[in-house]
Structure formats: C-alpha cells, structure tokens
Amino acid sequence: MWHGDPGFGRRRAGRAETDRSVDARRARRAHDNTADSRARRFTEGLEDAISGLGGGCFEHAGHKADHVEELRRVLGLLLDVLADWEMLAARPGERLE
C-alpha cells in the first residue's frame, strides 16, 4: 500500500464496507457461469493494476505528458465498456447494483 496516496484514508475507511460485502459476493459467485468469471477477473485485474501504481512511479517518469494522454485513452475505453455493461445489466430480469 502506498501511503503517500491522497486517497489512502478514503480507501481504508471503505474497507469495512468492502469486507461486509465479501459474503454477498461469494454467494453470487456460487452461481457464476463462464462469462461471470471472466468479467470478474477483468475487473479484479484492473483493480490490481491500479493498486500497483503506488511507490512514486509517475512522479519519477520522464514522459509524464505521454502517460497522461495514454491514461486518458484507456479511461475512454473503460467508460465505453462501463456504458455497455450498464446497458446490458439494465435489461429486464437483471439487477444493477
């Protein structure tokens, strides 16, 4: 964990809520199909990648503007994926949480 991160306290405070939802997630996973497992691995992989950004990797980068532009591009792709997933999840019979 990178304690120099300005969001560190907010994430720590949110852990209790996250811990409470672990049982609910496990119950839902009991009924996962292959697509559910792949979607979960995708989002968990993103979270792991983001969590691994600490330690001053950006502060010491020599091409900061290039990295910002690349992150903007990737965020645009992620927003498109999110919009698609929200639309699919809002179909009748699906519950958007």
Image (spheres, helix red, strand yellow):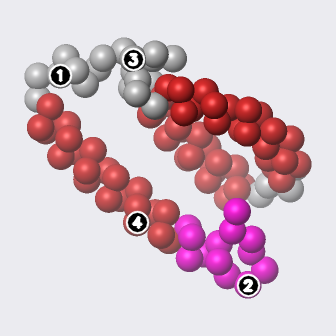
Asked if the residue at tag 1 contacts the one at tag 4, i.e. Cβ–Cβ closer than 8 Å, the answer is no
Q: Amino acid at mark 4?
A: Asp
Residue 3: x percent and y percent? 46, 16
Q: Amino acid at mark 3?
A: Gly
Q: Which of label 3 and label 2 is nearer to you?
A: 3
What is the secondary structure assignment of the residue under circle 2? loop
Sequence-wise, the earlier of marks 1 and 2 is 1
Rendered image: mark on residue 80 = 4
Residue name at image x 40 percent, y 24 percent? 5
Q: Residues within 10 Å of mark 4 (few under 14, many from 20)?
A: few
Disc 4/disc 1 C-alpha distance (Å): 28 Å
Asked if the residue at tag 1 contacts the one at tag 3, i.e. Cβ–Cβ closer than 8 Å, the answer is no
Residue that mark 2 sits on: 92
Residue 78: x percent and y percent? 41, 56
Residue that mark 1 sits on: 61
Sequence-wise, the earlier of marks 3 and 2 is 3
Sequence-wise, the earlier of marks 3 and 1 is 3
Name the main secondary structure of what is drawn in magenta.
loop
Asked if the residue at tag 2 contacts the one at tag 3, i.e. Cβ–Cβ closer than 8 Å, the answer is no
Residue that mark 3 sits on: 4
Q: Nearer the viewer, residue 53 or 2?
A: 2
Quarter of the C terminus within the rendering:
bottom right
Asked if the residue at tag 2 contacts the one at tag 1, i.e. Cβ–Cβ closer than 8 Å, the answer is no
User: Where are the magenta residues, as a range?
Assistant: 85-97
What is the secondary structure assignment of the residue under circle 4? helix
